[in-house]
Image: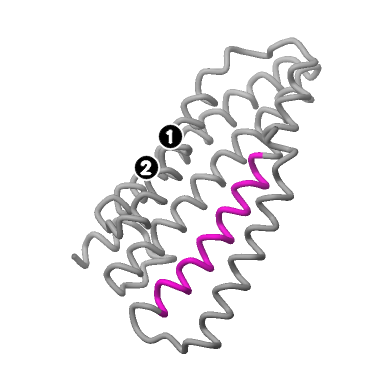
C-alpha cells in the first residue's frame, strides 16, 4: 500500500509547489504570508522525501520477511514510533503555529540518532560473529538509517515552523546552541 501510494505523494508535492509559486507570482505576498508560503513549499519537499523513505522501508521489510529473523526487532519499532510521533507533532505544530511543540520535535531527534547508532553497533557485532548474517543485517541497517532520516525530515519541518511563527532561522544550528540564545 505504501509503495503503491508513492506516485500520489509525488504528484501532490508538485501540485503544492506549483500553487505556492502561483500565489507568490500573482499575490506578491509580504512578511507573514510569504513566510507561510515558503514554509509550505519546504515542508512539502520534506514530506515527499519521508514518503520515499517509507517506500524504501517497505521494500526492505518485504525482503526481510523472506528470511529468518536475525534478532528481535526492539529498537527498530521504537525508532519508528518516535519518528512517526515527530512527523505528526511537526505537522501539528505547523497547523497550530505552535513553536513550542516544534522545539519539542527538535529535542527528540537525538533519541532517534542514538537508537540508530545502537542498532548499527549491534548489527556490526552480528556481522563480525557470523558473516552469513551480513545480507540481513545490512537490510536492517538500511531501515534504521531510513527511520533516522525520517526523523531528520521531521526536524526540518519543525525548524521551518519556528521560522514561520517566530521569524527565526534555526536551521543548521545545534539545538543546544539555539537554547542558549533564548
Count all numbered tags in the image, as a single digit: 2
SS at circle 1: helix
Instruction: Using the image as rendered, state which of residue 51 and residue 181 is in the foreground.
Output: 51
Query: Could you tell whether 107 is left or right of 27 in the image?
Result: left
Which residue lies at the image location 75% right of the left edge and 39% below the top edge? 4
Mark 1, Cα crowd under 10 Å, few <14 / some 14-19 / many 20+, is many
Instruction: Using the image as rendered, state which of residue 67 and residue 34 is in the foreground.
Output: 34
Whether 38 is among the magenta residues is: yes
Numbered mark located on residue 82 in the image: 1
Q: Which residues are magenta?
A: 34-54
Q: Position of residue 19 (x, y in %)?
A: 58, 72
Do callouts 2 and 1 mark residues in contact (Cβ within 8 Å)? yes
Q: Position of residue 123 (x, y in %)?
A: 63, 24
Vertical side of 73 occupied by 88: above or below: below
Mark 2, Cα crowd under 10 Å, few <14 / some 14-19 / many 20+, is some
Q: Main secondary structure of the magenta part?
A: helix
Quadrant (top left/top right/bottom left/bottom right) for the C terminus: bottom left
Label 2, label 1: how far apart the Cα atoms are: 8 Å
Residue furthest front in the image: 26
Residue furthest left in the image: 182
Q: Position of residue 125 (x, y in %)?
A: 63, 22
Which residue lies at the image location 42% right of the left edge and 43% below the top edge? 88
Q: Position of residue 33 (x, y in %)?
A: 38, 78
Whether 49 is among the magenta residues is: yes
Query: Could you tell whether 142 is left or right of 178 in the image?
Result: right
Task: Locate residue 14: give its quadrant.
Answer: bottom right
Which residue lies at the image location 52% right of the left edge and 35% below the top edge? 117
Residue at the spot of label 2 = 108
Amino acid at each position: 500500500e505504501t509503495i503503491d501510494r508513492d506516485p500520489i505523494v509525488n504528484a501532490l508535492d508538485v501540485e503544492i509547489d506549483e500553487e505556492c509559486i502561483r500565489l507568490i507570482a500573482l499575490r506578491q505576498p509580504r512578511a507573514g504570508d510569504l513566510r507561510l508560503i515558503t514554509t509550505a513549499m519546504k515542508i512539502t519537499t520534506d514530506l515527499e522525501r519521508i514518503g520515499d523513505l517509507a517506500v524504501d522501508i517497505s521494500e526492505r521489510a518485504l525482503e526481510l520477511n523472506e528470511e529468518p529473523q536475525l534478532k528481535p526487532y526492539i529498537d527498530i519499532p521504537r525508532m519508528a514510533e518516535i519518528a512517526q510521533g515527530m512527523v505528526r507533532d511537526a505537522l501539528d505544530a505547523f497547523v497550530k503555529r505552535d513553536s513550542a511543540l516544534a522545539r519539542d520535535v527538535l529535542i527528540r531527534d537525538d533519541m532517534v540518532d542514538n537508537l540508530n547508532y545502537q542498532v548499527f553497533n549491534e548489527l556490526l557485532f552480528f556481522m563480525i560473529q557470523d558473516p552469513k548474517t551480513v545480507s540481513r543485517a545490512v537490510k536492517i541497517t538500511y531501515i534504521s538509517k531510513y527511520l533516522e532520516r525520517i526523523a531528520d525530515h521531521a526536524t526540518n519541518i519543525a525548524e521551518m515552523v519556528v521560522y514561520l511563527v517566530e521569524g527565526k532561522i534555526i536551521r543548521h544550528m545545534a539545538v543546544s546552541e539555539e537554547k542558549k540564545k533564548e
